[in-house]
Image (tube, helix red, strand yellow):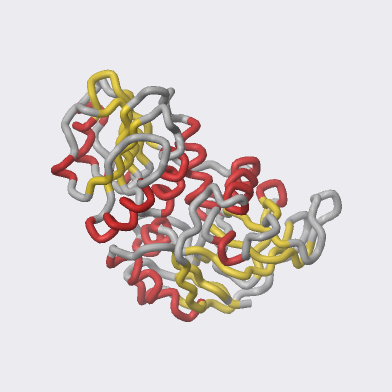
Amino acid sequence: MRAVGLTRTGGPEVLEVLDLPEPEAADALVIETAAAAVNPVDLATRSGLIPTSLPAVLGWDLAGTVAHAPAGSGFRTGDRVLAMTAQLGTGVGSMAEYVAFDPGFVAHVPDGLKLEEAAALPLAGVTATQLLRRTPDRTGKRILLIGAQGGVGAHLAARLLDEPSTRTDLLVRPSDLPVWQEQRAGRPGEGAVLADPAQVETGAYDIVIDAGGVPALFDAVRPQGAFLTITPFSAPDPAARPEVAYTLIGVELDRDDLVSVAEAAARGIAPRQELTVLPFEDAAEAHRRLERGGFRGKLLLVP
């Protein structure tokens, strides 16, 4: 079978379409991949910023159909499914024609949701869900969300903007300002859309959620407030402000969260991002586009 992977780290040019044996079924669920999403973690793994064993197949997200279902798994051959494989922890990359994974962390794709749409959801949606679960009580609080235009940020914004008891300001890229001003309009909560970190008030926020990697805005949190980030390589030094509750979020495999994200997308609650679909052979181009920045939506690779 074909898979997108690497035998050495470096720039996008190190990506290859590898010829690998199909995974053995055993007690695993075997998924025939329809699409796998490209995420920033894949870029960091490919470049060597995040160490991984080599050779490696990349990818954390996928959707497809069940090719083999072990007895008692709750799945049948042909079922439409999605999964987050957490490649760095499990060693299982999603960018392969067939992926064998623990059925306990796989979810059905709801009716009305295309497989390509489902493939864009797992990592971003589950990260956002787990981040909000660890966010302090938001009732009556002023919140700053950094990086609302990104995958995780879009999921967070969809939830925060529908909370009428909070005032949520969004910080986005200048090129995304008109899109998010439209998103902001008519939502129940109050707040502004900002496009320049210089517009952010120092010490004005009860909670700052950084989904974009802007550590300088650690100063935007008031004393005794909370700062949460998902960007370990562009995070502030928590020792600089010990009076602020600092949390670095690392996503964990959780089937219930995956089911919740998929069902929210099917009901139109979670954001449906613009999808750009490329073949496995164009994996390097997908990495270049994401690396250049300014990309809107989600990049998917298909076998």
- In the rendered view, does 50 fall on the left or right side of 97? left
Q: Residue furthest left?
A: 198
Please report the residue visible at 31 percent of the width from the left and 28 percent of the height from the top: 142
Pick the front one: 21 or 244: 244
Place of residue 181 in the rendered image (x, y in percent of width and height, measured from the top left): 31, 51
Counting from the top left corner in percent of width and height, residue 132 is at 46, 35
Residue 84 or residue 158, whichever sits in front: 158
Does residue 63 sit above or below 107 in this rendering? below
Toward which corner of the image does residue 28 lie, by quadrant? bottom right
Which quadrant holds the N terminus? bottom right
Judge whether 278 appears above or below 181 on screen. Answer: below
Snapshot quadrant of residue 242 = top left
Whole-percent x and y of residue 227? 31, 31
Q: Quadrant of the C terminus?
A: bottom right
Judge left or right: residue 29 versus residue 76. left
Residue 186 position in % (x across, y down): 40, 44
Q: Residue furthest front?
A: 186
Residue depicted at x 51% and y 71%:
301
Q: Residue furthest bottom?
A: 281
Q: Residue at x 48, y 76 (%)?
A: 278
Which residue sits at x=43%, y=59%? 39
Number of disc labels: 0
Q: Is residue 126 above or below residue 204?
A: below
